[in-house]
Image: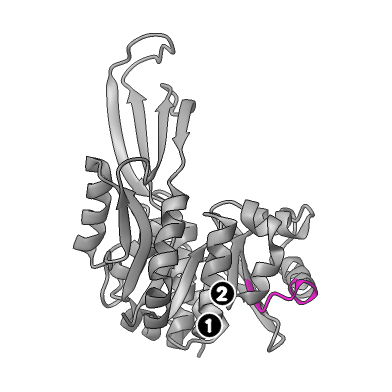
């Protein structure tokens, strides 16, 4: 396969927007938007949009929406050979109704069928992991799935990078992070992991805390994003870290920025960049993503050529 294998799930957001005042017990005329999402799916699209080979290991279903999300990824150039299909409820869905102010009036969530995904990994896991270059693992999908993928990665000596959708699996199994090549999260997630409120720390203070906690917890490499304040990173094995400022950017939609940051940082690391340079790669990709309405970066096969020129100039 020779690609990055991304283990995760699909999500689709279905959002309704009323034309006039929203009446919760009545019939409301408006518009409905269907958006393909899910952190791991977004990461796959980011990889494909800049020409990096990627294979999505996931589950979908036989509904029209289920077939559409796979078809869309295939058209973008994402590998879909290891996406399995079940009859129904294979993808996660979020049905949301917004009021006339744009605020959430009500919602229903459908979780994806992770049992089917686990069976799929049991059947094809050795084949997938032995053939891939490295792994991105959505660790919130299932604790047992995470354990199996980590074991396969160790069996075939593959590096694992972690996606956080929610922190439940990580908080239940914090030692999983010791078995990863790099853990990337935002400051809220880091606060939950460290069991402390860190939202008011400036980047310099965050870096000091990151060094202390990652060494204490045995996390080899960790990056914490801080929104407009940039990000901090630390490599415990090399005892090297730093601060990466955000880039001045016209904000259109921040959806998917964190996913693009993770995708760009992992791409950099898999290309042999230093952690510092990889984090700058993620920062650049995130800045491009927030300039568009989509939840993934714009298609740009020349991204790395352009980034190399900009990065070389910035460090002179």
Find residue 27 and report its image quarter: top left
| Residue behind mark 2 | 151
Find numbered disc 1 in the image and state the secondary structure of the residue it sits on. helix
Q: Which mark is residue 178?
A: none
Q: Residue at x 27, y 27 (%)?
A: 31
Numbered badge on residue 155: 1
What residue sits 50% from the left and 59% below the top?
258
Horizontal and vertical percent position of residue 44: 36, 64
Q: Is residue 124 above or below residue 167?
A: below
* Whole-percent x, y for residue 99 in the image: 43, 22
**In front of the other: 131 or 4:** 131
Please say whether residue 221 is one of the residues in the magenta stretch: yes
Instruction: Compute the Cα span from label 1 to label 2.
Output: 6 Å
Foreground pick, 211 / 216:
216
Which quadrant: the N terminus?
bottom left
Task: Answer whether residue 230 is visible to the viewer in this image.
Answer: no
Q: Is residue 226 left or right of residue 17?
A: right
How many C-alpha atoms fall within 10 Å of the one at disc 1: few (<14), some, or many (≥20)?
A: few
* Residue at x 32%, y 50% (from the top left corner): 60
The answer to whether the residue labelled 1 contacts the one labelled 2, judged by CB atoms less than 8 Å apart, is: yes
Question: Which residue is found at the position 67% from the left and 74% from the top?
Answer: 178
In x, y percent, where is residue 204? Answer: 73, 70
> In this picture, is 22 found above or below 269?
above
For this orientation, the residue located farthest to the top is 26
Q: Nearer the viewer, residue 256 or 245?
A: 256
Element under disc 2: helix
Q: Is residue 274 magenta?
A: no
Q: For the image shown, how many numbered marks are present on the structure?
A: 2
The answer to whether 50 appears left or right of 135 in the picture is: left
- Return the residue nearer the eye: 225 or 221: 221
Q: Which residues are magenta?
A: 214-222
């Amino acid at each position: 396969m020779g690609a990055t294998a991304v283990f995760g799930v699909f999500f689709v957001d279905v959002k309704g927007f009323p034309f006039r005042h929203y009446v919760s017990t009545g019939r409301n005329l408006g518009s409905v938007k269907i958006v393909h999402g899910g952190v791991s799916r977004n990461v796959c699209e980011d990889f494909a949009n800049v020409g990096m080979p990627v294979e999505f290991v996931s589950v979908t279903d036989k509904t029209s929406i289920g077939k559409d999300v796979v078809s869309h990824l295939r058209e973008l150039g994402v590998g879909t050979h290891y996406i399995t299909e079940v009859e129904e409820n294979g993808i996660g869905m979020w049905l949301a109704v917004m009021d006339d102010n744009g605020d959430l009036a009500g919602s229903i969530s459908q979780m994806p069928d992770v049992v089917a995904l686990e069976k799929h990994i049991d059947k094809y896991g050795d084949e997938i992991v032995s053939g891939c270059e490295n792994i991105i693992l959505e660790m919130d999908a299932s604790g047992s799935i995470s354990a199996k993928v980590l074991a396969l990665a160790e069996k075939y000596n593959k590096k694992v990078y972690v996606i956080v959708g929610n922190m439940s699996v990580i908080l239940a199994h914090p030692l999983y992070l010791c078995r990863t090549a790099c853990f990337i999260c935002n400051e809220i997630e880091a606060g939950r992991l460290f069991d402390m409120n860190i939202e008011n720390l400036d980047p310099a203070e965050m870096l000091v805390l990151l060094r202390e906690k990652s060494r204490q917890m045995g996390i080899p490499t960790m990056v914490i994003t801080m929104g407009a304040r940039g990000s901090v990173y630390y490599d415990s094995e090399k005892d090297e870290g730093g601060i990466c400022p955000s880039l001045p950017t016209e904000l259109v939609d921040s959806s998917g920025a964190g996913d693009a940051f993770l995708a760009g940082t992992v791409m950099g690391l898999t290309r042999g960049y230093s952690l510092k340079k990889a984090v700058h790669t993620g920062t650049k990709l995130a800045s491009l993503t927030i300039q568009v309405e989509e939840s993934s970066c714009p298609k740009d096969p020349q991204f790395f050529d352009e980034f190399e020129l900009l990065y070389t100039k910035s460090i002179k």
